[in-house]
Image: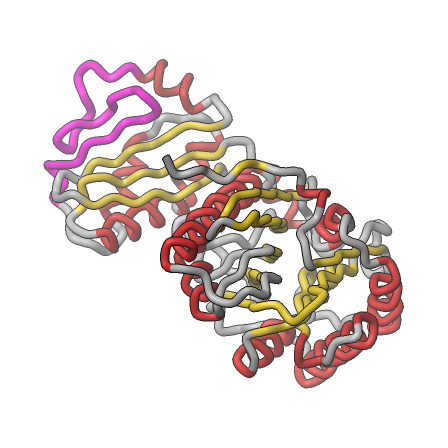
Amino acid sequence: MKRRPEASDPTAGCPGFRFAGVAAGIKKNGNRDVALMVADEPAVTSAVFTQNRVKAAPVRLSAQHLARRKRLRGVVINSGNANACTGAQGMRDAKDMAVRAAAATGASSAEMLVASTGVIGARLPMAAVRAGIAAAGAELRPDGFGDFAEAILTTDKRAKLAALRTRIDGQPVTLLGCTKGAGMIMPNMATTLTFVATSASVSPAQLTAATRRAVAPTFNAIAVDGDTSTNDTLAVMASGQRGAATAAGAQAFTEALTELLSNLAQQLMTDGEGVHHVVSIEVVRAASAATAARIAQRVAVSPLVKTAIAGADPNWGRILCAVGNAGVAIDPDRLALTIGSVPTVSRGAVRSTWDEAAARAVMQTPRYRIVVDLGLGGHKARYLACDLSHDYVSINASYRS
């Protein structure tokens, strides 16, 4: 029997890595806002970045560094300021962050990824950032992952961490990850800021393939508000020094990474801005996987569906409306819909036995499923969606203040 990865204590760290998170004064509330993750030796690294065409300077710089070498030493992050839409000075500041992080860790600047998150359009307070990087460098320790995870937060209500232990090719392996994000969350290669450290031994090609496969059903299958950020970065660093994994080992690693990212993605959704309900939108019996995914995504981001979720209103017509405007071919007379365990629509019309009160009761719970049956084939897709609440509007109406 194949052994499943086991949950572990995230604060115990990951072999081959040190972490730190400090308060440098970037955030008005005085919380931690500069973070460092450093590998003791050059680590195989893979990352996916936002596909928003307005990319922040740190995203562009990190993509350049990763394109030139597949083994890096670490990542430096600031929160409270996105360093996005800041022109040539923004890129100079991102490069300065890499230089300062390299000096604090004994690496070269080209071996550092850089990430920023926060308000768009404001210059980084570089005096505070530089002091924060130096302080973080002095505080690096194997058990500092909790501080690191706190320092990358913005409007998040809590840090989001996960850890797994497993065996790959007969060797014990740790996977340790954290994520941040509460708004501006929409799948498009990455979503939010997410960092994973692992002690696995994998080749660059194996890590790249595993990252992309693990992101698809996890961080690329969630939507809080339909907006893809300028700063999205998801990076995985592997400290193992034994070289490439076997084919079976690479598959086992991909499965473990997918499980870790699934855990983090679900934590991110439950911590979304103003989120009170997390709903699994499941499209089944589609003609193709692409069709299923497109419809699931459309339902997940529909403002009318999201407000119905917020009000626990079983307005099933809004769901079918979103299915129909997803831009793919369907047969309306074959549509079926279930809310939780309550059969609602059959052959494109409400069932005569539909129990609206039971459907409303389902929608008042914090987590439930909506299943759309297209009746056209054997493919399926799943997205995690959430409500659009008054709290979300209040948070984002005053984000900069």
Q: State yes or no: residue 76 in magenta.
A: no
Residue at the spot x=76%, y=73% of the render? 123
For the residue pair 273 and 373, the one nearer the viewer reads as 373
| Position of residue 229 measured from the top left corner of the image (x, y, whole percent) | 55, 61
| Position of residue 309 measured from the top left corner of the image (x, y, whole percent) | 44, 32
In the rendered image, the residue lying farthest to the bottom is 88
Q: State yes or no: residue 341 in magenta.
A: yes
Does residue 1 appear to the left or right of 41 in the view shown? Answer: left
Does residue 24 appear to the left or right of 186 in the view shown? Answer: right
- Vertical placement of residue 123 versus 77, above or below: below
For the residue pair 342 and 18, the one nearer the viewer reads as 18
Magenta residue span: 331-355
The colouring scheme, among rainbow, by chain, secondary structure or one colour, is: secondary structure
| Position of residue 185 measured from the top left corner of the image (x, y, whole percent) | 52, 53
Q: Taking the image as drawn, is residue 82 in sight?
A: no
Residue at the spot x=43%, y=34% of the render? 279
| Position of residue 228 measured from the top left corner of the image (x, y, whole percent) | 50, 60
Where the N terminus falls, by quadrant? top left
Residue at the spot x=44%, y=38% of the render? 3
- Vertical placement of residue 170 versus 203, above or below: above
- Vertical placement of residue 81 versus 308, above or below: below
For the residue pair 38 and 312, the one nearer the viewer reads as 38
In the rendered image, the residue lying farthest to the front is 170
